[in-house]
Amino acid sequence: MEKKTQGGGWLSATLAFVLILCLNAHAQNFTDIKPSPQQVEWQDLEFGVIIHFGTNTYLDREWGDGTASPQVFNPAEFSAEQWMRAIQAAGAKYVVLVAKHHDGFCLWPTDQTNYSVNSSPWRNGKGDVVREVSDAARKFHLKFGVYLSPWDRHEPKYSNSAEYDNFYIAQLDELAGNYGQLVEFWLDGAGSAGHIYNFPRFIENLRMTQPNTLVFADAALFEYGDIRWAGNEDGVIFYENWNVLDRHGYSRWRPVEADTPLHKNHWFWHPNDESSLKSVDELISTYEATVGHGGQLMLGLAPDRRGLLPDADVKRLQEFGAAIRHRYSENLMARERIPNTATDAAFDGDADTFWSAPAGSHSAVLQAEFRHPVTFDHTLVMEWLNDGQHVEHFRIEAWDGKLWKTLVEGNPIGHKRIDSFPPVTASRIRLSILSSSAEAHIREFQIFDIGSGKSRSSADP
């Protein structure tokens, strides 16, 4: 039998530890960080909604204080399917329901407190908003997620951190275990009243039941979050959007979700509030400042006291969806270019295919030639991110018959980048990858002639 000395064992362990450190250090290079399959799938959803509904709806409030009577909650015409039809018409692909806001009122019959729909007159105390919304979402082929506020202004246990953490985890277990696959779990950092949350424990418990759920949180909850906040509630990503976030020398793939309400400056329904409804043009600008900046749009919706989305909101969502579909329906690249089998995968309108630059390259040119000069004013470029975000500097140029004219120059492309510029007529266009960490992969390179005549839907007032 071989005898191992204590010193040799110590040396082997030390070498192994150093090797692990080296491997981890290598993995922390920005361009080596890759998304999980769940993150890839989520980023392709692009547009979701978050729904605020509860006692605040009946009391003309944004933030309840936990003293509202459950008796005020009675949506006599409640229809989750009416919500989903409007959401689907808008083009959204997933729904996050605020199951409990800061006031502590729960939209499902939780066993942890009586401060819920169980104590309301709605459905004679037998209703479950979370159940009806999750079922309706899946019926309309929308993915479903939940928001469970850590701050609870009603629950007496909140004053004791350890007791409240147990209470919160029990509620989280109910939501995670009883309503099917959750696409996203929203963690809101608002409020605390001195309470220190055990976020690691929360997420570890969530993972046991929902290992594929992505956790939304701001950058401070770094180790456990999968999605990060844009930093504002205006629906704007105003910075160059890289998917990798670095904190204290440790990097993670954390794509951006930008949230903003359909009505200006508030999330819950309020009476006589039609004037705050955002216009179609405002919503298009929001879309292009979120999805068009490589992030995710999360639009806030608010059912009214009937339990329905207001008629004006439904109409606006339909108009918005129609406008986006109309705006990006005619990819001139697919119609006007001269086919080239070497590059067609980037121009075919199919995001499941992609063009790759030569293996090992750090710069490349992707070019298309048209049958005749084409006029356009918008470009849309998508990078294939499964292997990481590689493009670090690029330029889009058009050939006007005499020289190459720069239309767009930037650094990241990311999931999707939409750029606009004055109309240009060209016989050729090219995407020049000026710098990339590895060979670039381009899913789509599209051009559009939107102009003043196409920028608005026929349904837009």
Image (cartoon, rainbow, N blue to C red):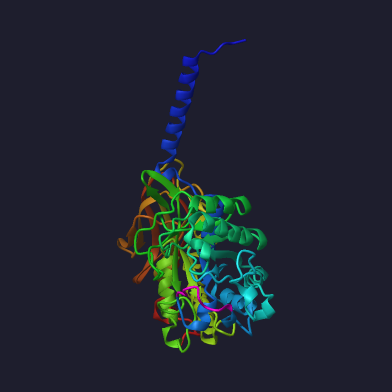
At 42% across and 72% down in the image, what residue appears?
A: 286
Q: Was residue 145 drawn as part of the magenta stretch in this picture? A: no
Q: Quadrant of residue 420?
A: bottom left
Residue 343, compared with residue 19, is above or below; it is below
Q: Is residue 134 visible?
A: yes
Instruction: Work out whether residue 333 or residue 415 is closer to the camera in this orientation and state it.
Output: 415
Number of numbered discs on residues: 0
At 54% across and 68% down in the image, what residue appears?
A: 100
In screen coordinates, is 250 left or right of 120? left
At 46% across and 28% down in the image, what residue appears?
A: 17
Residue 183 place in picture, x, y as percent: 58, 60
- Seen as rendered, the residue at the extreme bottom is 272
In screen coordinates, is 110 left or right of 35? right
In screen coordinates, is 180 left or right of 409? right
- State whether the magenta stretch is mostly helix, strand or loop: loop
Residue 320, compared with residue 47, is above or below; it is below
Q: Quadrant of residue 429?
A: bottom left
Q: Which residues are magenta?
A: 63-70
At 56% across and 51% down in the image, what residue appears?
A: 37
Instruction: Work out whether residue 453 or residue 162 is closer to the camera in this orientation and state it.
Output: 162
Residue 172 place in picture, x, y as percent: 58, 59
